[in-house]
Image (cartoon, rainbow, N blue to C red):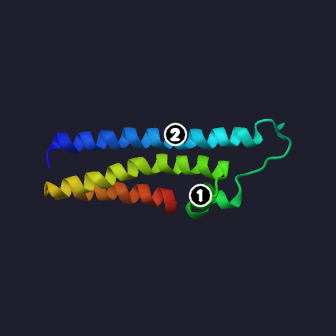
C-alpha cells in the first residue's frame, strides 16, 4: 500500500463522513422543523432526551421509523463514527506495512476511543 493512497483514502473518508453526517442531521432538522416548527417552546420545565435516544439501537430504531429526533441523533453518531473508522483504517495500513509498533499504538488509541464511548 502506497502512503499517498492511504492518505488520500483517509482524507476522502473524513470529508465524506463529515458531509454525510451533516446531510443526515440537516434532513432530521428539516423534518423536525416541519413537525414542530410552529410550537411555542416550554422552557419552564427541562425535558431531557427521550430514553430511546440514549442508546445506539434505540437511535437507529427511531431513525428508521422516520422520527426527526432519531434522524438527528443518527447523524451525530455517524459524525462520531467517522474518526473511529479512520483509526481502524490506520491499523490496517500499518499492519500491511508490517509496522507493528504503530499498529500497537494505534490499537491503544482505538481502545481509548471505544472505552470513552462505551465504558467511561
What label sits on residue 56 in the rendered view? none
**Residue displayed at 42% across by 55% down:** 113
Q: How many marks?
A: 2
Q: Is residue 8 left or right of residue 116?
A: left
The answer to which of 87 and 25 lies nearer the viewer is 25
| Residue 102 in view, yes or no | no
Residue 108: image location, x then y, percent? 32, 58
Q: Secondary structure at mark 1?
A: helix
Q: Secondary structure at mark 2?
A: helix
Q: Which residue is mark 2?
A: 23
Q: Is residue 53 above or below residue 24?
A: below
Q: Is residue 12 left or right of residue 78?
A: left
Q: Is residue 55 left or right of residue 118?
A: right
| Residue 27 in view, yes or no | yes
Q: Residues within 10 Å of mark 1 (few under 14, many from 20)?
A: few
Which is nearer the N-term, disc 2 or disc 1?
Answer: 2
**Residue displayed at 42% across by 44% down:** 17
Residue 94: image location, x then y, percent? 20, 54
**Residue displayed at 29% across by 43% down:** 10
Residue 79: image location, x then y, percent? 48, 46
The answer to which of 85 and 66 lies nearer the viewer is 66
**Residue displayed at 22% across by 45% down:** 6
The answer to which of 42 and 118 lies nearer the viewer is 42
Q: Residues within 10 Å of mark 2 (few under 14, many from 20)?
A: some
Q: Is residue 45 left or right of residue 105?
A: right
Q: CA distance from mark 2 to mark 1?
A: 16 Å
The answer to which of 75 and 89 lies nearer the viewer is 75
Q: Are marks 2 and 1 in contact (CB under 8 Å)?
A: no
Residue 59: image location, x then y, percent? 60, 58
Q: Which residue is mark 1?
A: 64
Quarter assignment of residue 53: bottom right
Amino acid at each position: 500500500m502506497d502512503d499517498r493512497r492511504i492518505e488520500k483514502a483517509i482524507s476522502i473518508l473524513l470529508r465524506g463522513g463529515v458531509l454525510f453526517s451533516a446531510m443526515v442531521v440537516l434532513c432530521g432538522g428539516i423534518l423536525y422543523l416541519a413537525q414542530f416548527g410552529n410550537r411555542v417552546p416550554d422552557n419552564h420545565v427541562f425535558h431531557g432526551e427521550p430514553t430511546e435516544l440514549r442508546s445506539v439501537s434505540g437511535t437507529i430504531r427511531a431513525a428508521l421509523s422516520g422520527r426527526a429526533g432519531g434522524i438527528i441523533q443518527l447523524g451525530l453518531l455517524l459524525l462520531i463514527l467517522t474518526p473511529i473508522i479512520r483509526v481502524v483504517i490506520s491499523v490496517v495500513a500499518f499492519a500491511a506495512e508490517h509496522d507493528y509498533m504503530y499498529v500497537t499504538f494505534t490499537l491503544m488509541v482505538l481502545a481509548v476511543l471505544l472505552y470513552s464511548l462505551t465504558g467511561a
